[in-house]
Amino acid sequence: MPSVNFRLLLVTDRHHTLGRPLVPLLDRAIEAGVQAIQLRERDLSTPELLSLVQDAYAVSARRSVPLLINDRVDLMMAMNLDGVHLRSDSLPAQSVRESIGSRRLIGVSTHSAEDVQLANRSGADYVVFGPVYDTPSKRAFGPALGLALLDEVCRRSAIPVFAIGGITCDRVQDVRRAGAYGVAVIGALLTRDDIGEAVREFTDALQI
């Protein structure tokens, strides 16, 4: 299985950029040291998404930052991206692994202890678990799951668990103490006036 060598995963949502173009923000985040990007733009048509992937890959590949795309195994293969991130109700990770081979990363979104265990059994490289805290961008997935459940799933998971949902720099140490390998962040990075400064703050918090 590929190595998960990042602890800060930037999850994109161009609706949370305060009207700023997404790709220049990604470029600044990469320059500041963001370690991996999950392209999560589910409302785009295939041509629009392909164009965005091409632009994002142009900036991520320059600095060898892994770029993963939500669900679209076809675009991942076509663009030779670093991996794919699957929804909890998407294709099974095992089927995707059989299709894409062993070199690319597979991440899975999880919202319960059962989801995490299924991802472990199915050949995923890591899971994103949440929402840990209440956050508007994740309310569609139900109420906040909390640190106690995060602690439980981390203890039982053989693969890295990234906490998502309401993650701020002040909460990084709490989720790390609960066993999270890293954090996946949307708003706390994309809505900041200076995304580079935000990336550096998260990077410092994750090193403590």
Image: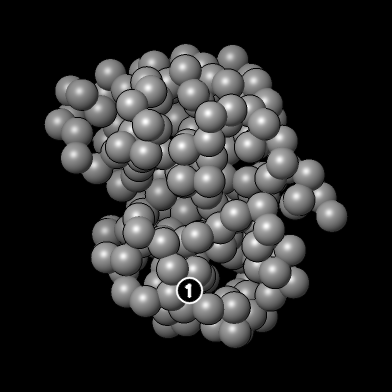
Disc 1 residue crowd, few under 14, some 14–19, many 20+, Cα 10 Å:
many
Q: Percent from the top left, x then y, of residue 74? A: 27, 36
From the top left corner, tell me how far across and down residue 148 is, in percent: 59, 84
- The residue under label 1 is 116
- State whether residue 83 appears in this view: no
Image quarter in which the C terminus is found: bottom right
Q: Residue at x 43, y 75 (%)?
A: 144
For residue 64, which quarter of the picture? Answer: top right
Residue drawn at x 56%, y 58% as measured from the top left: 167
Residue 37 position in % (x across, y down)? 51, 37
Q: Residue furthest right?
A: 208
Q: Position of residue 88 (x, y in %)?
A: 33, 65
Q: Secondary structure at mark 1?
A: helix
Q: Residue at x 28, y 58 (%)?
A: 91
Q: Which one is in front, 192 or 27?
A: 192
Report the number of numbered marks: 1
- Quadrant in the rendering for residue 196: top right
Specify how the rendered protein is coloured. Answer: one colour
The answer to whether residue 32 is above or below residue 62 is below
Amino acid type at image mark 1: Val
Q: Choose between 97 and 184: the one closer to the eye.
A: 184
Residue at the image point whose x is 34% and y is 33% from the top: 14
> Looking at the image, is 113 positioned above or below residue 127?
below
Q: Is residue 141 left or right of residue 124?
A: left
Foreground: 50 or 133? 133
Say if residue 50 shows up in the picture. yes
In this view, 51 is above or below 189: above
Left or right of 166, for residue 91: left
Quarter of the image holding residue 92?
A: bottom left
